[in-house]
């Protein structure tokens, strides 16, 4: 399908009907997340793919009372890492070596370049880490539209409660944003068929030659 048509079709779906999204569509959406660019290619985040109805209900009751959380097919929770450790860097560079087989000299120089991130406290890295998550979120939204799967990014939740429910601190993770995936319920999705509100191109873009 045409990318611009996909983006015109997409909207923030405020009401879903509980119907299941086929697994092959979910897998392509997740592959798009995996292929999203991140700073230094480090992918310092994890995406929890929640299908369990009881868990979705608990998240709704205790962290986020928004209808798509329980009515979606799959609830994606994007969680950033809270620290970059020596072990994380070891795993990252092992992966680079397996995929690209670079020279040892290049690996050592590249590692020295990013050593400064190691063991920094979360407060000093949180904004940078969250930006990487939002790039991946954007890819997920576009991929979902391409599959004609409805979605809605959700930031309005109690992060501490969501972290607790999903045991994220024990995994050195912290929730950033959620993305329910499913199919719209026209009676509950008040955004359905609403025109997009976007600036005119002349007001948004400035061409500098």
Image: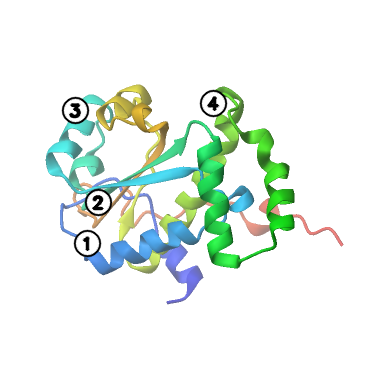
Q: Secondary structure at mark 1?
A: loop
Identify the mark at residue 61; answer none if there is no mark: 3
Q: Residue at x 41, y 44 (%)?
A: 46
Residue sticking out furthest to the front = 104
Contact? badges 2 and 1 (CB < 8 Å): yes
Residue sticking out furthest to the bottom = 1
Name the one closer to the observer, 40 or 30. 40
Q: Is residue 71 above or below residue 27?
A: above
Q: Secondary structure at mark 2?
A: strand
Asked if one can make out residue 109 in the rendered structure from this viewpoint, the answer is yes
Q: Identify the residue under disc 4.
A: 122
Q: Quadrant of the C terminus?
A: bottom right
Contact? badges 3 and 4 (CB < 8 Å): no
Q: Identify the residue under disc 2.
A: 74
Mark before the other along the chain sequence, 1 or 3:
1
**Foreground mark, 4 or 1?**
4
Asked if one can make out residue 197 in the rendered structure from this viewpoint, the answer is no
Contact? badges 1 and 3 (CB < 8 Å): no
Q: How many marks?
A: 4
**How far across and down, in percent of the image, does residue 26 sit?**
30, 62
**How far across and down, in percent of the image, does residue 81 sit?**
47, 36
Mark before the other along the chain sequence, 2 or 3:
3
Mark before the other along the chain sequence, 3 or 4:
3
């Amino acid at each position: 399908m045409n990318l611009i048509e996909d983006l015109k079709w997409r909207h923030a779906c405020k009401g879903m009907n509980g119907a299941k999204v086929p697994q092959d569509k979910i897998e392509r959406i997740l592959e798009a997340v995996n292929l999203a660019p991140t700073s230094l290619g480090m992918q310092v985040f994890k995406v929890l793919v929640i299908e369990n109805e009881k868990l979705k209900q608990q998240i709704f009751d205790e962290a986020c009372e928004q209808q798509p959380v329980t009515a979606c097919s799959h609830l994606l929770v994007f969680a950033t890492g809270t620290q970059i450790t020596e072990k994380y860097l070891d795993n990252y560079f092992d992966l680079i070596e397996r995929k690209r087989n670079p020279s040892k000299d290049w690996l050592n120089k590249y590692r020295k370049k990013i050593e400064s991130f190691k063991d920094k406290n979360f407060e000093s890295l949180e904004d940078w880490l969250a930006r990487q998550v939002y790039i991946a979120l954007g890819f997920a939204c576009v991929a979902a539209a391409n599959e004609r799967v409805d979605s809605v990014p959700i930031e309005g939740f109690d992060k501490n409660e969501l972290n607790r429910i999903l045991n994220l601190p024990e995994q050195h993770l912290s929730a950033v944003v959620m993305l329910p995936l499913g199919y719209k319920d026209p009676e509950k999705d008040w955004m359905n068929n609403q025109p997009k509100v976007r600036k005119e191109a002349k007001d948004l873009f400035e061409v500098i030659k």
